[in-house]
Image (spheres, rainbow, N blue to C red):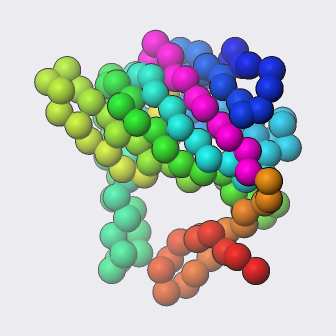
């Protein structure tokens, strides 16, 4: 990983890095409790999901080599640890796009991340009627 020395942070993930793990580790190392996230690049493979609210479960789909057209999300805390909630739009060789909740992705050529810490922490709380851990404000 190569990074700029100041916040907001800009860093580049290397080919073969797992995106969710690398961003989460970066936040743990830098004590980031809340942030907004943006990114572009490419993946060798990725797993995205669509949340079925009625069934309260994700439908998963895996994709091969594609461009990251957009990676957007946030960092909050779950059990006092950084948690990445991100959605990704991918584009293939035929220029068609797919998108969804990012479960994991292996970096292809590069993944350039822009991470802007927020001045307060954000926490998530499980909401039974939704079936997810949503942002919770005291």
**Which quadrant of the figure has residue 25?**
top right
- Is the residue 74 above or below the residue 68 in the image? below
Q: 65 or 123, which is in the foreground?
A: 123
Return the x and y of residue 6 as percentages of the image width and height. 80, 26
- 111 in magenta: yes
Q: Is residue 67 left or right of residue 82?
A: left
- Is the residue 54 above or below the residue 74 in the image? below
State which quarter of the image contains the C terminus.
Answer: bottom right
What residue is at 35 percent from the left and 40 percent from the top? 89
- Is the residue 62 above or below the residue 51 in the image? above
What residue is at 74 percent from the left and 19 percent from the top? 4
- 87 in magenta: no
What residue is at 44 percent from the left and 23 percent from the top? 41
Residues in magenta, as a range: 107-118
Extreme left residue here?
Answer: 94
Return the x and y of residue 26 as percentages of the image width and height. 74, 34
**Which quadrant of the figure has residue 24?**
top right
- Is the residue 113 above or below the residue 129 in the image? above
What residue is at 41 percent from the left and 42 percent from the top? 88
Return the x and y of residue 54 as percentages of the image width and height. 33, 80
The reply to whether residue 32 is in sight is yes
**Which quadrant of the figure has residue 98?**
top left
Q: 120 or 46, which is in the foreground?
A: 120
Return the x and y of residue 47 as percentages of the image width and height. 40, 41
């Amino acid at each position: 990983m190569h990074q700029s020395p100041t916040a907001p942070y800009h860093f580049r993930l290397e080919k073969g890095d797992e995106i969710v793990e690398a961003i989460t580790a970066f936040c743990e190392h830098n004590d980031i409790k809340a942030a907004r996230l943006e990114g572009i690049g490419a993946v060798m493979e990725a797993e995205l999901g669509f949340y079925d609210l009625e069934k309260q479960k994700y439908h998963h789909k895996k994709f091969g080599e594609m461009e990251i057209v957009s990676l957007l999300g946030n960092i909050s805390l779950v059990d006092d640890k950084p948690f990445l909630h991100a959605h990704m739009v991918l584009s293939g060789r035929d220029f068609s796009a797919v998108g969804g909740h990012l479960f994991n992705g292996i970096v292809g050529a590069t993944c350039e991340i822009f991470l802007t810490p927020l001045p307060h922490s954000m926490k998530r709380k499980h909401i039974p009627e939704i079936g997810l851990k949503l942002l919770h404000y005291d």
